[in-house]
Amino acid sequence: MIVVHHLNDSRSQRILWLLEELGLAYELRRYERDATTRLAPPELKAVHPLGKSPVITDDGHTIHESGAIIDYIIRRHGEGRLAPPAGSWAHEAYLQWLHYAEGSAMLPLMLQLYAGRLGEAAAPLKPRIDSEIENHLGYIDHSLEGHDWILGEALTGADINLSFVGEIAGVYGRLGQFPNIAAWVERFQARPAYKAALERGGAYSFARG
């Protein structure tokens, strides 16, 4: 059985959503952030040396990184669901979006998080960070125009991995000028599997913008 090593208020929530969408049985092992530092507890290092989440174990193997976990679960357990057929051009686009979520789109939002902790010292960085956030959100918003999901009319693992970007952008109040992203976030947050994942994983403070 898949074991999800789940850290509260983290991107591992996406993995729970994926498993609920696929209707797969899984074991949930909870870890709590330090209330002061907001860092993961040292117990996660016993699972993987980086001590980060998400991380899963399955069939004696440990897998980390959201994109790799989503790809693995869909290929090994998805039975053709939540991804276009391998070898198709749609699958190439799917892989691009799957890795874009963490490889590019999340970076400026994380920079905003850390720069915000520096106060006025981060002022010289703010214009560049704002520009990059608007650049990426504009790209995603345009790509969602005219259809419900990032690849068209069907939800895929790419939407699940990209979801955290939309949610965090909402937390930062960035979605006012990006109506397609705002509608997409509302759409996936209304899905029964998404709600079931929240119930299973516990309170998720970034779930609403």
Image: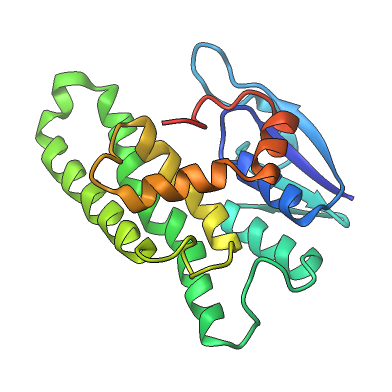
Percent of width and height locating residue 116: 27, 25
Q: Quadrant of residue 141?
A: bottom left
- Classify residue 105 as left or right of residue 156: left
Percent of width and height locating residue 89: 51, 86
Which residue is rendered at x = 41% and y = 37% of the image? 168
As drawn, the residue found furthest toward the front would be 146
Q: Is residue 204 above or below residue 129?
A: above
Percent of width and height locating residue 156: 59, 63
| Colouring mode (rainbow / by chain / secondary structure / one colour) | rainbow
- Classify residue 120 as left or right of residue 47: left
Which residue is rendered at x = 74% and y = 28% of the image? 30
Q: Quadrant of residue 59?
A: bottom right
Which residue is rendered at x = 23% and y = 45% of the image? 177
Percent of width and height locating residue 131: 16, 48
Q: Is residue 3 above or below residue 36?
A: below
Q: Is residue 118 above or below residue 135?
A: above
- Classify residue 172 as left or right of residue 165: left
Image quarter hosting the C terminus? top left
In terms of depth relative to the viewer, which is nearer, 176 or 77? 176
- Classify residue 131 as left or right of residue 202: left
In terms of depth relative to the viewer, which is nearer, 175 or 40? 175
Which residue is rendered at x = 66% and y = 26% of the image? 42
Q: Is residue 209 above or below residue 141?
A: above
As drawn, the residue found furthest toward the top would be 36
Number of marks in the rendered image: 0
